[in-house]
Structure formats: structure tokens, C-alpha cells
Image (cartoon, rainbow, N blue to C red):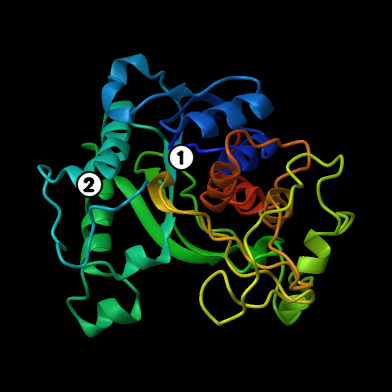
Amino acid sequence: MKIISLFCGAGGMDLGFVKAGHIIVWSNDNDSDSCKTYEKYFKHRPICTNIEKIPSLEIPNADIVIGGFPCQGFSIANPYRHTEDKRNKLYLELLRIIRDKEPKYFVAENVVGLCSAGGYETSKDRAKKTGKVLKIILKELENAISIGYTVNFKILNSADYGVPQARRRIIILGTRNDIEPKIIHPNPTHSKDGKDNLPLWKTVKDGLKGIPEKTDGDIPNHHGTEHQVKINGHIGNRATKWNEPSPTIVGRGGGTGGPVIIPHPNLKRRMTVREVARLQNFPDDFIFEGSISSQYRQIGNAVPWPLAYNIAKMIPIK
């Protein structure tokens, strides 16, 4: 099916959908380094500008809208969204495109913190991890068009889909109400303990197989950093273990601040860009552009393609 990809970044989610047999007909991001990375691999450049500046008429029709929308405006201090609140503008752009293009399906990804943003109204909400802000978002998506969408969400862990990383994200799925079948969240392909005869979670050792510990060789993006290792229990400063999935690879939001780079399991240095790309399942011929900080950020903000692939497989190709 034809896809509109919003907030595409370097293209992790797009890669999963392409591998599942879908076609990206239009993509957008406002980060120039991410756009260069995307173009280098996919051989076509996203529309690299603020989505607010792009009229819906300039975007082609498609069957699916996908995107990991930023949500800085949905703060705990301000739980009720107003259209006048500029901090919410990027979610509103996702909603605009869905309203104007009326796709058969949409897939939205976000951090787990969205589930609790704004607090909870009832204990039932808390049990289901449905906070005030998420309730607003789900309701607006359900009513985005006159015929409506069937919308559901679930927290998925990338480790359950063959990614050597413990990375939990909320995935929101929508199916237009005149379309069958309704898409559902995929069953895990891997498990922590071998339950249901599934393969075990992949580990850091699996992810880094074939990558030499010596850096600055011929492998693209495999360059050392000057960030010293200091194990103190804080994020980015916890020991990485060979025989477990890595902790979540993160990026600094908005391109500001230094990158959070986890230690290599040898605890003698930080992971290189190529190593964290491996832990996000990017192939070695996926070359990251821009400064080193930008490269780390692009990877940390991406959706691992195996997770996206398993979601995409739940949607008919035609």
C-alpha cells in the first residue's frame, strides 16, 4: 500500500514498512541531517521543511499514514490540549493530514510517558495506562473524519520482535471504519524466557557480532568518542551487559544538548555510532550524515525496523 511518512527522521519505521512490501510515496522531516541520511539510503529525499508550511493539497493521497509524532506540548502541568497551544502543533499536524487524506490506516508511535501525561482520572485509567492526554488523543483520532476510525493502543517492547534492545514504546493503530480487516498489534516473535517456544531475546553480543572493538577502521560510522565511561547508575552511565538486550538507545530531543551514549560492554569506552545503529537493527550500509552528535540523535529517535516490519505485516499490501 502507499504510505505517507510524517516525522520520518532517518527512516527506521519506513525501512520496516518497505521490507513488508509497502511503498513510501511521500515523506517529511524538518531535520536536514536526518533528511540527508534518509536520502542516502532510500535514494529519494524527504520534503525537508516544517510540516506546518506544507498544505495538504501538496501531499499525495495514500492508504496509510505513519509517524512518531513529537508531543512536547502535552505536559503534566498542562493536561488539557488547546489548539492555540503551539507546543502541541506537531500532533495537530498528524491529525490534520489524517483528516484531509482520510487514509485507510494509520500507525503512530510515541514514548511510554505519553500514557501517563496529564495524570489519570480514575483508577481504571491507571490500570490501563490511559492518562488524560492520551484519552484526548485517542478520541480525536477516532473522530478525525466523519466515518471515524477504530483506534487502539498498546505498549510494545522492541526486544519482543528480535531487536537486541529493551525499548518500550506506545503504538497507536487506526483503521477507517469502512475498512476490513481492522489492524491489530502483532504477536511477539521473541521472548525473555522462551515462553510459547519463541526464540530468546537477542543480546548485545548478538547485535554487535562482527563489529571489531577497535574503532576508526573501515566500517562506516564506527568511530570512537571522547566521552569517558563513568558507571554511576544514571541513564547513559549504567553498565551494558553482553548477554542481555541493551538499555534503550535515546536521543536528545530537538537536537539540543549532548548525546546520551551508553558504554560498550568492555566498559573502556562508549558505543560508536555504528554500534548503537546495530542495536537499533540498522543495516551496516545505512550511513548516517551530519555531526557525530546528530548521528547519535538520529539513531536514538528512530523506530527499530523489525518492530515496524511486524506492525506493517498486519496491514494488507493491497
Q: How many marks?
A: 2
Residue 37 found in image quarter: top right
- Compare residues 297 and 45 and report the one nearer the observer: 297
Q: Which circle marks residue 216 in the picture?
A: none
Look at mark 2 in the image and give the residue it sits on. 88
Q: CA distance from mark 1 to mark 2?
A: 18 Å
Give the left or right position of residue 17, taking residue 104 as reference. right
Give the left or right position of residue 206, taking residue 11 as reference. right
Look at mark 1 in the image and give the residue it sits on. 66
Instruction: Residue 235: give x, y in percent of width and height.
Output: 52, 72
Instruction: Residue 30: give x, y in percent of width and height.
Output: 41, 31
Circle 1 SS class: strand
Residue 98 found in image quarter: top left
Residue 291 found in image quarter: top right
Instruction: Residue 212: give x, y in percent of width and height.
Output: 88, 55
Q: Amino acid at mark 1?
A: Ile
Q: Quadrant of the N terminus?
A: top right
Q: Amino acid at mark 2?
A: Asn
